[in-house]
Image (tube, rainbow, N blue to C red):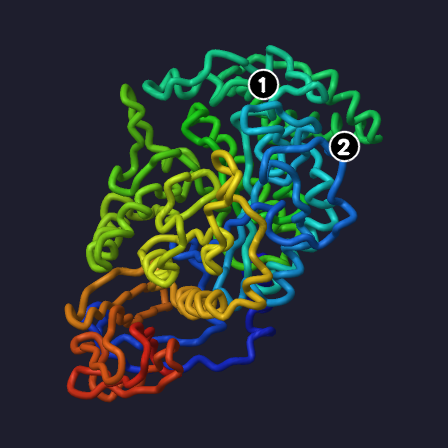
C-alpha cells in the first residue's frame, strides 16, 4: 500500500497536463459517461502492445570493438556468422527516437546470454550462435552482444521512453556440441531420441533436432553443477558468488536442485538485477507445462522484488508478462493446444499470451473478416488472455508477403488486427526476406536495411505509413485491446472501444477509402457536433449528419476525439 501511495504522489508530481472531459454519445459507452482523453493518462496494456522483435546481432552495431570473441573466425555459410549488432546498437536507436516514431511500446530481442564458442559443421555451412538460442552459460552475457552495463543502460533508456523490455529465454535446450563446447552431463540433458512431433511424449521428451541436447525438465532429482561450468566461473573469479546465490535461491524456494530450477534461477536473475518487464519464452510445447508455471512464479517474485527496491523506476502496476512460442498455435484453437493425444492449456501455466501463427494466412482475407474474427475470439474463448500476432518472423519460412510486394497492406493488417502486434525488424522498411545464397532461416535474418531508410524514397514512404499507424495504435489501447464493430461497409469504416476503470478510449478507422472527397459513416458512435482529428492526414473535422467528410489523396483515416 505504501508503494502504491508513493507511485500516486510521484505521478501527480511529474504530470503537468490537465485532463479534459467531453460528453460523447455512443452505443458502447453510455451517453452519461465522461470521456477522459490525455496522452499522459494512456495506460499501457499488454493485450494491445506494439512489440518490436529484432535479432540482437542483426539490428545495429553500436560497438564494433566487440564484434569478434572466443576466436569465432571460421568461415560460415551465408548469413550464419556474427555481424556486429549489439545492445549498444539498440540503445542508440532508442535514443534517436526510432522506436518512439514507430509507435513501439515494447522491444523483444533475441537471447543475449553467452553462446557456444565453436561453430557447427552443417550442410548449410558453419554456423555460430549469432541468433542467441545456443546457450553455453545462462549466467553470463555473450560479449558479442555486450556487457551487463550495456543491458542496464538499454533497459533504463527504454523505460524513460515508456518502452518495456522483453527478454527472449530458453529453458528447453543447451547449444549444440562442438570441439569447443562439450555436452552437458547426462543427468542434465538427453541427446536422443529426436522429436517426432506426433504425440505429447515425442514432442517433450526428445531433442528438437540432432545435436541440440534437451534439458531434462521433468526430473526432480538433484544434480551437481557441470565441472566445465564450475571451472569457467572459477577462471572468471565468480565461483564463490554464484554458489552463494544458488544456496540462497534453493533455501528460499525449497526446490530440489534439479536442472530446470537452476536455469529458472539464472533466468530470473535478469529480472532481479535489471527490471526486465517480461519474457518471450522459446520452444514452449517442448517442455512439460508445470515448468512454465514455476518459471512464471519465480519471475513474478523477482519482478515484484525489483519494484520494491526501485520504487522511483516503476512504470505501472502491470504484472510480469510472459508470451510463449507454442509452434503452430493458432487463435482459432482457443486456449488449448492439441498434441494429438493430449491437449494442454498453456494459458493456465503462466502465459498471458501466445504467439499466433494464424494471422499470416488470415491476412489474405478482407479486413472485416480478419478484424471481426479476432475481436470475437479475444472477447469470448480467450477472454482475459491474448495473442501476439505477426506476419513475418525469424524462423517462419512462409511469411505473409515474403517478397515485400505489399508492405502497406501488411501494416494495415498487422497493426489494426485486435491483439498484440509483433513487428519483425524490417517489416516497416521492406527489408528483403529473399537473400541469394542463403539456406533455410538465414534468408530471413539479413542485417537491418538502414541505408535504404536513409536513401530510398519508397522505403521512406513505407516507413512513414507504419509510423502513422503505429503511433495511433500506441496512443489508443482500443485498437489492440478493444472491441471491434463495423460502422460502414463501403467505404469500409469500423470502430474500436476500450474501457478499464475510469479510462475509456474510442476511435474510428477507415480503410480502402476513395481518393479525393470521402464520407465516413460514424452515426451512433460519434454524435453530431463531435470534433475529431484524423491523425493520418493531420486534419480536424466535425461530425455532421452522422458523417465525417474528408478530402485528401489517402485511402486511410485514423480518427480520434480532438482534445
The image shows residue 6 at horizontal and vertical percentages of 59, 63
**Residue 329 showing in the rendered view:** yes
Q: Compared to 518, does 183 lie above or below?
A: above
Q: At 39% across and 53% down in the image, what residue appears?
A: 420
- Label placed on residue 457: none
Residue 215 visible in the snapshot: no
Q: What is the x, y in percent for residue 270?
A: 64, 41
Q: Position of residue 464 (x, y in %)?
A: 46, 70
Of the 4 image quadrants, the one containing the C terminus is: bottom left
Describe residue 21's horizontal placement relative to residue 10 as left or right: left
Instruction: Give the position of the N terminus as an image quadrant.
Output: bottom right
Query: Quick one: 404 or 333, which is closer to the camera?
Result: 404
Q: Which residue in the protein does label 1 denote?
A: 258
Closest to the observer: 319 or 95? 95
Residue 453 is drawn in which quadrant? bottom right
Is residue 336 depicted above or below 311 in this figure?
above
Is 342 drawn above or below residue 537 in the view shown? Answer: above
Q: Earlier in the sequence, mark 1 or mark 2?
A: 2
SS state under label 1: loop
Q: Residue furthest front?
A: 436
Q: Which residue is mark 2?
A: 70
Amino acid at each position: 500500500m505504501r508503494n502504491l501511495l508513493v507511485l500516486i504522489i510521484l505521478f501527480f508530481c511529474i504530470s503537468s497536463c490537465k485532463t479534459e472531459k467531453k460528453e460523447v454519445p455512443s452505443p458502447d459507452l453510455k451517453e452519461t459517461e465522461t470521456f477522459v482523453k490525455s496522452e499522459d493518462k494512456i495506460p499501457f496494456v499488454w493485450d494491445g502492445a506494439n512489440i518490436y522483435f529484432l535479432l540482437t546481432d542483426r539490428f545495429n552495431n553500436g560497438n564494433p570493438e566487440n564484434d569478434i570473441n572466443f576466436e569465432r573466425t571460421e568461415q560460415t555459410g551465408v548469413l550464419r556468422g556474427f555481424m556486429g549488432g549489439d545492445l549498444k546498437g539498440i540503445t542508440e536507436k532508442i535514443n534517436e527516437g526510432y522506436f518512439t516514431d514507430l509507435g513501439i511500446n515494447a522491444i523483444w530481442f533475441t537471447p543475449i546470454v553467452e553462446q557456444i564458442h565453436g561453430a557447427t559443421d552443417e550442410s548449410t555451412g558453419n554456423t555460430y550462435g549469432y541468433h542467441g538460442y545456443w546457450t553455453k552459460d545462462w549466467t553470463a552475457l555473450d560479449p558479442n552482444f555486450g556487457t551487463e552495463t550495456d543491458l542496464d543502460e538499454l533497459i533504463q533508456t527504454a523505460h524513460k521512453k515508456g518502452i518495456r523490455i522483453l527478454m527472449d529465454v530458453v529453458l528447453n535446450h543447451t547449444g549444440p556440441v562442438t570441439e569447443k563446447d562439450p555436452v552437458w552431463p547426462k543427468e542434465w540433458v538427453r541427446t536422443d531420441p529426436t522429436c517426432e512431433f506426433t504425440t505429447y511424449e515425442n514432442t517433450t521428451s526428445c531433442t528438437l533436432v540432432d545435436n541440440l541436447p534437451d534439458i531434462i525438465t521433468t526430473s526432480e532429482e538433484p544434480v551437481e553443477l557441470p565441472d566445465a561450468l564450475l571451472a569457467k566461473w572459477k577462471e572468471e573469479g565468480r565461483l564463490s558468488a554464484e554458489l552463494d546465490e544458488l544456496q540462497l535461491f534453493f533455501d528460499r524456494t525449497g526446490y530440489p536442485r534439479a536442472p530446470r530450477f537452476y536455469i529458472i534461477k539464472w533466468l530470473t536473475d535478469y529480472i532481479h538485477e535489471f527490471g526486465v518487464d517480461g519474457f518471450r519464452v522459446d520452444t514452449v510445447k517442448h517442455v512439460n507445462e508445470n515448468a512454465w508455471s514455476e518459471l512464471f512464479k519465480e519471475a513474478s517474485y523477482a519482478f515484484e522484488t525489483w519494484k520494491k527496491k526501485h520504487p522511483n523506476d516503476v512504470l505501472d502496476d502491470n504484472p510480469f508478462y510472459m508470451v510463449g512460442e507454442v509452434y503452430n498455435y493458432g487463435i482459432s484453437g482457443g486456449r488449448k493446444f492439441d498434441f494429438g493425444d493430449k491437449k494442454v492449456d498453456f494459458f493456465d501455466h503462466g502465459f498471458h499470451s501466445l504467439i499466433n501463427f494464424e494471422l499470416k494466412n488470415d491476412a489474405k482475407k478482407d479486413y472485416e473478416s480478419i478484424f471481426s474474427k479476432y475481436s470475437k475470439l479475444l472477447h469470448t474463448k480467450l477472454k482475459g488472455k491474448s495473442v501476439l500476432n505477426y506476419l513475418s518472423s525469424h524462423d517462419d519460412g512462409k511469411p505473409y508477403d515474403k517478397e515485400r510486394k505489399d508492405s502497406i497492406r501488411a501494416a494495415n493488417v498487422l497493426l489494426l488486427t485486435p491483439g498484440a502486434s509483433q513487428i519483425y525488424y524490417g517489416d516497416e522498411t521492406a527489408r528483403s526476406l529473399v537473400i541469394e545464397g542463403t539456406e533455410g532461416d538465414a534468408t530471413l535474418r539479413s542485417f537491418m536495411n538502414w541505408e535504404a531508410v536513409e536513401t530510398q524514397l519508397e522505403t521512406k514512404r513505407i516507413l512513414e505509413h507504419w509510423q502513422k499507424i503505429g503511433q495511433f495504435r500506441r496512443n489508443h489501447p482500443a485498437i489492440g485491446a478493444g472491441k471491434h464493430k463495423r460502422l460502414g461497409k463501403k467505404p469500409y469504416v469500423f470502430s474500436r472501444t476500450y474501457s478499464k476503470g475510469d479510462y475509456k478510449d474510442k476511435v474510428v478507422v477507415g480503410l480502402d477509402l476513395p481518393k479525393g472527397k470521402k464520407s465516413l459513416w460514424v452515426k451512433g458512435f460519434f454524435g453530431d457536433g463531435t470534433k475529431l482529428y484524423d491523425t493520418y492526414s493531420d486534419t480536424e473535422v466535425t461530425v455532421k449528419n452522422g458523417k465525417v467528410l474528408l478530402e485528401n489523396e489517402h485511402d486511410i483515416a485514423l480518427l480520434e476525439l480532438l482534445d
